[in-house]
Image (cartoon, helix red, strand yellow):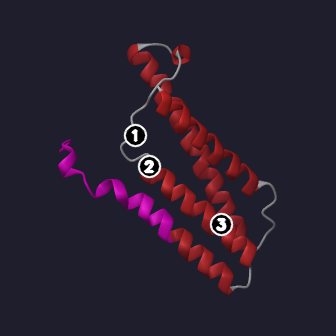
Amino acid sequence: MWLAPERRGRQGWLVPVFAMLAGVGVATFLVYREEMTAGLIAGGVLLAYGVQLAYRRDERGLAVSESFGRGRRGGAHLRAAAMTGDVLVAGLVAAVVVQALRGADLGPLPYLAGVAALTYLISIVIAADF
């Protein structure tokens, strides 16, 4: 397995590009079914998720406080917290897309996706200061 950055160039782009293309496809399909609002919401959520995945391709964990501990143990706790957030956001994105494709009411799911995106943007701004 090659770990050099020049050897893993395209692999990091596969999932973000797939998410963005899926967003365009879902939005197009729902607009074709005359569900403009659901199409724009589901497409926007998938596009934003693809952008977030693209941004995080080479991101390293940065502890902004000592709440996760220090050293190796702190890094493990930070990765576990990040993975928990990733799984929750992926589940939320999947729920929005499935509900939109079913033609069901999206309910509070778009708002929760917006809160997740806003939280991530705030964490980026805070981490950039450190």
Q: Classify mark 2: helix, strand or loop.
A: helix
Report which quarter residue 48 is drawn in: bottom right
Q: Are marks 2 and 1 in contact (CB under 8 Å)?
A: yes
Q: Which residue is mark 2?
A: 55
Q: Nearer the viewer, residue 85 or 36?
A: 36
Residues under numbered marks 3 and 2 in contact, where contact means CB atoms less than 8 Å apart? no
Nearer mark to the viewer, of 1 and 3 = 1
| Picture residue at 44% right of the left edge, 24% below the top | 76
The segment highlighted magenta reads 1-21
Please tell me the numbered disc located at residue 59. 1
Mark 3 vs mark 2, foreground winner is: 2
Is 32 rendered above or below residue 24? below
Q: How packed is label 2: few (under 14 Cα within 10 Å), some, or many (20 or more)?
A: few
Within-10-Å neighbours for mark 1: few <14, some 14–19, many 20+: few
Does 58 sit above or below residue 19? above
Residue 42 — which label?
3
